[in-house]
Amino acid sequence: MDPSFWKGKRVLLTGHTGFKGSWLALWLQLVGAELVGYALQPPTNPSLFEVANVASGMKSIMGDVCEGEALRQAVIDFHPEIVIHMAAQSVVHTSYMEPVSTFQTNVMGTVNLLEAVRQVGGVRAVVNITSDKCYENKEWIWGYREVDPLGGYDPYSNSKACSELVTESYRNSFFNASRYSEHGVAIATARAGNVIAGGDWTQNGLVADIVQALLEQQPVLIRNPHATRPWQHVLDALNGYLTLAENLYNEGPAFADAWNIGPYASDIKPVGWIVDKLLGFWGDGAAWEQDEAYHPHEAHSLSLDCAKARLKLNWSPKISLDQGLEQIITWTQAYQSGANMRQVTEAAITQLM
């Protein structure tokens, strides 16, 4: 991403109170964007949004993307140039317990956002953040490409595939490349891997569960130690989103497509490997155990082919998995010691830039 591009740009970020959204909100503030966030209250307590004082330096609107008129009014009032849509129910396990709200948020939330963009006008670039889990998972060893079929076994994964289809429909029906001179809007989707970083307190999320167990000096309970995922530091994913948004703004329909934003193949590791690494960095006799309780179905094998982003966006990961895991422990220990977590988080962003 080009830091100078963002200075003074009007950016609407949905989901800014979440884990990824909070990291991105701080980054956009650092590069001088005029930022408005639209989201529910922080989903966890504690939350990165609160401990890093993310709200200072931006306008924060507490609202639900399921409330279409309120979202539309936010777009009218702010008149953004760029929209990054991150508001979502983002946990597979939660989607089994709350399928209706998962589909409402992830599907109709996308409809409401794109409808507001269509009705209000003035937006030039939209990036809808979906998920690596939007693909029809065939449990194969190859990375999924953007042309592979969409699917989704569980409500979360399926809802993200639906969000992809909604975006494609709006792009074809209302923001078609052939009429770009009339509407001036370029819309893309970004499918990142399993993002990791300090400040993640997401319930039933691997890193959050590990960190919580470490802080409580309890053994870490692991559901699927042999499951593999495309792990990546949150800043690598966000760098991809920002780079994509810049290209949409500058080049329009040439980049209005679906994009995988994931790690190198060498960083696709089993859950057990991740746990062992984190516990090793933490030290102090930390240990993990297999969780023998019943848990709903989750994909066993998942990886992404990101050749398209590397070739056309000139984007590539900058933080290795080892570095990312070590940063999680460093961030957590800083939090534990009472450090200024906005400064700690901003320092990590500045280092990547």
Image (cartoon, rainbow, N blue to C red):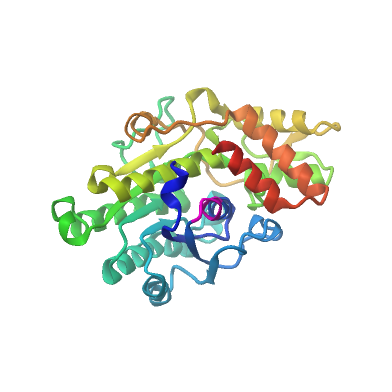
Asked whether 230 or 239 is in front, the reply is 239
Q: Residue at x 52, y 53 (%)?
A: 90
- Left or right, 154 with respect to 209, comes to left
216 magenta-colored: no
Which quadrant: the N terminus? Answer: top left
Above or below residue 56? Residue 176 is above
Counting from the top left corner in percent of width and height, residue 25 is at 54, 55
Q: Residue at x 59, y 52 (%)?
A: 19
- How many marks do you count on the picture? 0
Asked whether 160 or 37 is in front, the reply is 37
Residue extending farthest to the top is 266
Which quadrant: the C terminus? Answer: top right
Counting from the top left corner in percent of width and height, residue 109 is at 41, 64
Counting from the top left corner in percent of width and height, residue 140 is at 42, 27
Magenta span: 27-32
Q: Residue at x 86, y 33 (%)?
A: 284
Q: Residue at x 36, y 74 (%)?
A: 76
Asked whether 291 or 181 is in front, the reply is 181
Above or below residue 27? Residue 73 is below
